[in-house]
Amino acid sequence: MIPYGRQSINEADIQAVVEVLRSDYLTQGPAVPRFEQAVAGYCGAPYAVAVNSATSALHIACLALGLQPGDQLWTVPNTFVASANCALYCGAKVDFVDIDPDSLNLSIGHLERKLAASERDGKLPKVVVPVHFSGQPCAMEEIWKLSKRYGFYVIEDASHAIGASYHGHKVGDCAFSHATVLSFHPVKIVTTGEGGVVLTADTGLHDRLKLLRNHGITREQRLMLDPSEGPWYYQQVALGYNYRMTDMQAALGVSQMLRLDELVGHRRFLADRYDQKLGSLPLILPRRSPGCESAWHLYVVQLAAAVRKARRAVFDELRAEGIGVNVHYIPVHTQPHYRNLGFAPGDFPASEAYYKAAISLPLYAGLSERDQDFVVAKLANIID
Ligand SMILES: *Cc1c(COP(=O)(O)O)cnc(C)c1O
C-alpha cells in the first residue's frame, strides 16, 4: 500500500536518538532546549515550549491564555478534533466558523459576520484557532485585525504548516497571533514520534506554558511565591500536567529540523507534479493563496460535479489498487460528541460540501515519482 503520509527517517536521525539512549537523560533533558531553539530559530519566534503532542500544546496554550468555564473558543469544522477539544478540556464552550470553499481555511467573511452578531449578544469568543489546513496559511493579517477590534486571542493551529510562509513571514513567527502550535506526529512534515510545540513572542505566556507542561512546578525563584528553602526546593504555583517531551524525541526533532527545508522542498516538488498531471481531469485541485507558500502536509483533490462516480466508489477503487488515500476532515461538528453538545449536520455547509467531495492523495517526502505516476494513472482511469 502506498500510504497517504509517512515519516522520513535517515541514519543521522537514528544516530541522534541512539546517542540519547547512551546518555544520562531520557526524559526532558538537554536535548529539549536544543530542539526548542531549533524550532524557534527556524520559525523566527522568540520562544518555543516542547511538549508530548500538539494536542497537549493546544491545551496548555488555551490554559495559559486563561480560557476557562464561561468562555468560548472558535475554530473551523474542517480540522482534526484536537483543535476544538482543547476548549472542552478547559471547561469552555466550542463554536465553529465555516470555511472558505476556495482556500478551505477559515472564512474571513463568516468570521466577521459571526463576531458582529456575537458582539450584539455579548458572547464574543476569548480564543480563535485558525487552522492552516493542508499547510496553506490562513489570512492571518485579517484575523489579527479582527482580534484587535473584538479583543480575542489567536492560537494558530499550524500542525500542518511548519515550513510554510505567509507574506514573507515564516508560519510560527507569531507576528499575527499570540501563540502557534506545531505537531511532530509521524504523518506531519517533520516528526519526533509524538510531539508538539507552542511558539510565542510573549514572555509571560512562555513562563506559564513551561509551568503547565510540568505539573505547575517551578525551580526558578522569580516564579515562586515564597523564598526558596534550599537547592532541593521547588514550588507548585499552578495546576499543570505531565506533558513533557522525552530527550529521545527532542534529539530526533533536532535532527529532523536540519532536514526540514529539504523535506518540504520535496513535498512542493511532488505537489507541483500533481498539479501538472491532474490539471486536465474533472477535479478541483488545491488552491494556492497569493503571497503564501504551503508546507504541503496534504494534497487534497475534490471530485468535480462532472465525475459520475460517488466519492465512496472512487475511494474504494483507489484503495483496492493499493493506494492509501484518506479523507481530511470529517467536519468536527458532525462527530457524535459534538452533536451531543447541540451541533447538527447542516450547521456549516461549506465544510460539509467540501468533505463529501474530498480525497487526500499520497504525499510525503519519500514518495517516488514512479509511485506518484501510478496514483495519477489509476485516479485518471477511475474517474474518466
Ligand atoms: C495532527 C493534528 C493535531 C494533533 O496533533 P498531535 O501531535 O497528534 O496531538 C491537531 N490539529 C491538527 C490540525 C492536526 O492535524
Image (cartoon, rainbow, N blue to C red):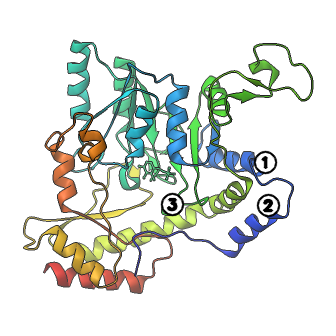
- Crowding at dot 1, Cα within 10 Å, few <14 / some 14-19 / many 20+, comes out as some
Percent coordinates x, y for residue 240 in the rendering:
62, 31
The answer to whether any part of residue 106 appears in the image is: no
Q: Is residue 164 above or below residue 127?
A: below
Q: Is residue 246 left or right of residue 283?
A: right
Alpha carbon distance from label 2 to label 1: 10 Å
Label 1 belongs to which residue?
29
Percent coordinates x, y for residue 97 in the rendering:
26, 36
* Residue beneath the point at 80% across and 28% down: 219
What's under tag 2, amino acid-wise? Val
Q: Nearer the viewer, mark 1 or mark 3?
A: 1
In primary-sequence order, the first of circles 1 and 3 is 1
* Residue beneath the point at 64% across and 44% down: 50
Label 2 belongs to which residue?
20
* Residue beneath the point at 15% across and 78% down: 383
Q: Quadrant of residue 84?
A: top left
Q: Is residue 102 left or right of residue 197?
A: left
Q: Decide: marks 2, 1 in contact (CB < 8 A)? A: yes
Q: Which quadrant, please, contains the C terminus?
A: bottom left
The residue lying toward the viewer, choosing from 203 and 225, is 225
The answer to whether any part of residue 98 appears in the image is: yes
* Residue beneath the point at 66% across and 61% down: 258
Label 3 belongs to which residue?
189
What's under tag 1, amino acid-wise? Gly
In primary-sequence order, the first of circles 2 and 3 is 2
Alpha carbon distance from label 1 to label 3: 24 Å
SS at circle 3: loop
